[in-house]
Image (tube, rainbow, N blue to C red):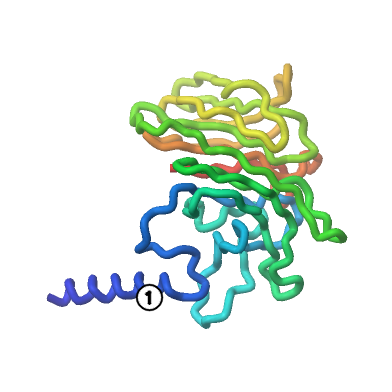
Amino acid sequence: MTRYRALAALLLTVVFSACEKNAVQEITAPEPGARVKFFNFSVGAPAVNFYAGTNKMTAISSTTGVESTNGVAYGAVGSGGFYGGIEPGAYDLSGRIAATVDKDLAIATLPSTLEDGKAYSYYLSGFYDGVAKSSSSFIVEDNFPAVFDFTVAQVRFVHAISNAAPMALIVTNTTTSEVDTLGTEVAYQAAGAFVSLPPGRYNLATRYAGGVTNVIARTNVDFVGGRTYTIGARGDITVVSTTATNRPFLDFTANR
């Protein structure tokens, strides 16, 4: 009986939490037809909350009833990497400053049409202009296969570094040493297609067209069968430090 009471209390907590002013969406309503994932990959950008028109799509939990001044920081993905559901239609997607100073000022706005049954990723990218208080942004469709195939993992590459030439993603299986190039070079603010790979652990690298030298590298990334992943390049390509926040980096985010 105690266990059932605890479960009932938990369910009530979920319901009431969805009614708070900082809640992103009503979880008891029918699932909206479009989905968007949000990334802050703009070097030097402040933490932001992401919006679709007037709909707040990402938020930081608050226990005070006052909206948190924390947001999605540089290098982070909104909502813990989960998609935000929204009704299909035309929206101005934006990243708005979360801090008290310049609160809710949009640093990037991108008119976009979100279609029913489709998933998208919206990126702040390039370099933040601290004088103009602006950033670049782009959106890509996450057109991964609808049918799950647990014998392979689906992987693609997204390029969000404004001062880097088009790059291709190279993956090397750490067990078999097999090397695969995931499609052709991807230009800034573009995405490659999802490619099937055998599940396993891989070393990742990007290379310019015709190059044999790695531009960015990351080791020991696990791809699980039946899952879908995006490898996103962010940072300043001129930085050579291996620890600087703005160094070139390959982000690893699961789409599903």
Q: Position of residue 137 (x, y in %)?
A: 70, 47
Judge from the rendering whether residue 120 lies leftward or rightward of residue 208; answer left or right. left
Q: What element carries label 1?
A: helix
List the residue tagged with mark 1: 16
Q: Position of residue 189 (x, y in %)?
A: 70, 38
Q: What residue type is labelled 1?
A: Phe
Q: In this view, does 203 lie above or below 21?
A: above
Residue at 37% x, 61% y: name it.
Answer: 29
Q: In this view, does 82 lie above or below 253?
A: below
Hey, which residue is sitting farthest front in the picture?
89
Q: Position of residue 244 (x, y in %)?
A: 73, 51
- Disc 1: CA contacts within 10 A as few (<14), some (14-19) or many (>=20): few
Quarter of the rendering containing residue 150 = top left
Hey, which residue is sitting farthest top in the picture?
210
For this rendering, which residue is in front, 228 or 180?
228
For this rendering, which residue is in front, 74 or 119?
119
Residue at 52% x, 82% y: name it.
Answer: 64
